[in-house]
Amino acid sequence: MSAVAEAAAAKRPVSRSRVLRRSPVGRFLIKVPFWLLIAAIFIYALFPFYWAIRSAFTPDSEQFTTPVKYWPANPTWANFKEVFSTSTFQHALINSTIVAGAVTLISLAIGSLAAYALGRFRFRGRSGVLYLMLSMTIFPQIAILGALYTIITGIQIHIWFISFTTPDIYDTRWALIFSYMIFTLPFTVWVLTSFMRGLPGDLEEAAYVDGATPLQVFYKVLLPLILPGLVTTGLLAFIAAWNEYLYALSFIQTPQNYTVPLSITSFVGKSGSTFQVPWGQIMAATVIVTLPLIAAVLILQRRILAGLTAGAVKG
Amino acid sequence: MLLIPALLVVALVAIYPLGKTIYYSFTNQEFLQGIEPTKWVGLENYRTLWHDTIFRNAVWETIKFTLITVAFEFVLGMIIALVVNSSFKGRGAMRAVMLVPWAIPTVVAAQMWKWMFDDVYGVINDAGVRLHILSHSHAWISEPSTALASVCAVDIWKTTPFVALLLLAGLQVIPSDLYEAASVDGASKLQQFWRITLPLLLPAILVALIFRTLDALRVFDVFYVFFGNRPDTQTMAIYAQSTIVGDGHVGYGSAISVAIFLIIAVFVIIYVTATRVAGDE
C-alpha cells in the first residue's frame, strides 16, 4: 500500500511535495502511511502467536463454536494441564533437551578445535576444508537419508582385516544425535572460524612468548575470548536440532522416544478422541515449546544477528 | 591435528553416507533384507524415475513452491528491511519481533497456521467472511486449488523476517553520505533506491536468494504437516522419504535423493555464476 503511495509521491512535481513536507499537517500526512505500514508488519508477524495463545486458553466448549470468539470469555489452564499430564509430551521434552543439548555440546567441542586450526593457522588445504564445510551447510539432508537409514540399523564394516558390525541405534536418541551432526557441525565450524579470525593476534603472541603450547593458548586465551561466539553458535545449533523433523520422523518409531516436533504433529490428546483434533491442547503445546526459544532469542538477539550475518553474509 | 575430529565426523555422517546413497541408487536394495538378494541394477532406477509421473509432479510442485515463496519473501523482506532501516521509535522492538517467527520450529508454525486455516472453526475463514473478503468459508488445505497457496503462506510468514534481516545487514553498511550527495544533486527517493541501494545491496540480495532457494527446494516439514503423503501435494523430499522409510525401497529412494541433489546442484551453479557475473561488473 504505502510503497505505492511513496512511489506516487516521488513522481509528483517536486514543488508540491516540498510544500507538503514543510507544513506540520503535511508532515503528519506523510508519516501516516509509514506508521500504518509498521502496524501492518507488527500485526502480520504477531497475530499467529496471539491466536495460538488465545486458543491455548480457550476451553473446548468455546473453541469449537461459530462464530469464532476473538477473546476467551472464560480463560482456562485446562489445556496446559492436559498437555503436561500427557506422557508422550513429557518424554518429548526430555528427549529433545537431551538430543539438542548433546548435539550442541559435541559440535561446539569439535567445532571450536577445528575453528582454531582454520582461523589461526595457515596450512595447505585450509581453504579446501573451509569450502567443504560451507558446502555442507547447504547440503540437502534428504540426499543421504537412504544410507543413514541403513547405517543406523547397523552395518558390516570391513577395514583391512578388521570386520565388525555397528550397533543398531534405530529408534533411539543416539540415531538423532549422530545424524544431526551433519547440519550442526559444519555450521559451527564455519561461524566459529569467522569469530576466531576476528581476534587480534597480540594476546596469543604474548602467551607463546611466555612458553605456552598451542593447546594451552587455545584453552586459556582464545576460548574465553570467543565465549560470546560460542554462546551464539551454540544457541543456533540448539535451535536447529530442537526444530528438526525429517530425521526424527524417519528414525524414531516409539512414541516414548518422540522429540517435540514429532509429538506436536501426532497429538491426539489424552482422551484420544478421533472426531475432533484437540486444537486447544496442540496450541498449548506450541506455546510451551515456543516460549523458551522466544526468551532465548530476545535475550541474545544482538548476538544472534551477528552470528547469522557472520554465517551468511561473509559466505 | 586439531582438524581430525571435525573431518572424521563430517566424513562419517556426510561423505560416507553420500557415497553409499549413490551406490544404493544403482542397486535394488530393500530395507528389509532377505526378501530378495541385493544386486547391481545399473541405470534401471534412473530409467524408471525418468518416466515416474509422481516424481515429475513432485518436482513441479516443489519448483512452483520455490518460485512463489522466494519471490514473495524477497519483495516483502525488502519492504520490511527498508522500513526498519529508517530510524523511528521502537526500531529495536521491531527487530526483536522479526526474529521470533524465524526461531520457532517449522512444525509449530505449520500447526498454528493449520488451525487458523481450519475449514469450520478457523480464524481466517471467520475474519474473511466478517470483513466481506470471502463470500463463504473455504477448506483451504484440502481443496486442491488453494492447497499450495496455504503452505506458501506459512513459509512466507516464517521466513520473510529472516530475509529482511539479511537485507537489513546489507543496508546498514551502505554509507549515508551517498544518499546525501544524491539528494543534493536532486535525485528523487525512487531514483536513489534504483541507482544506489539496489546495486550496493546486490551481494546481500544474492546471498538471501541463494539461502532461500536451496531451503525451499528441500522443503519437507510444512507440506508433511499439512498434507501427509497426499499424492497431489508431494514435494521431492516427501516422495523420497516415503519411498525409503514408508515403502522400504532404499535403492529407488536413493535414486530420487540423488536426483534431488543434482537438481539443487544445478540451482547452485546458476547462482554461483550469477554472483561471479555480478562481481565482475
Image (tube, coloured by chain):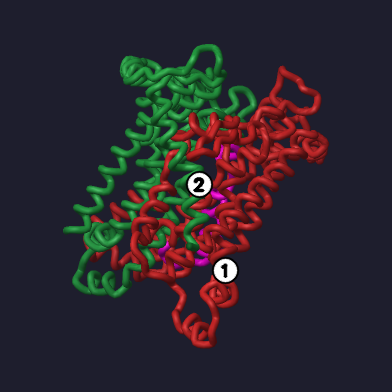
Chain colours: A red, B green
Mark seen at residue B2 = none
Left or right position of A210 against A139 = right
Q: Chain of mark 2?
A: A
Q: Does dot 2 land on a helix, a strand or a loop?
A: helix
Which residue ends up furthest to the front in the rendered image?
A161
The residue where tag 1 is placed is: A228
Residue B129 in sight here: no
The residue where tag 2 is placed is: A183
Q: Nearer the viewer, residue B1 or A204?
A: B1
Residue A192, placed above or below residue A131: below
Q: Distance from label 1 to label 2 (Cα)?
A: 21 Å
Quarter of the image where one finds residue A225 = bottom right
Residue B167, placed above or below residue A50: below
Which residue ends up furthest to the left in the rendered image?
B281
Q: Nearer the viewer, residue B144 or B256?
A: B256
Circle 2 Cα neighbour tier, 10 Å, few/some/many (<14 / 14–19 / ≥20): many
Q: Nearer the viewer, residue B250 or B270?
A: B250
Q: Residue at x 69, y 47 (%)?
A: A97
Residue A274: x and y, percent? Answer: 72, 18
Q: Which kind of residue does numbered mark 2 sit on?
A: Phe
Q: Earlier in the sequence, mark 1 or mark 2?
A: 2
Residue B144: x and y, percent? Answer: 46, 19
Q: Which residues are magenta?
A: B85-110
Q: Please state, as top left, top right, bottom left or bottom right, where the C terminus of chain A lies in the image.
A: bottom left
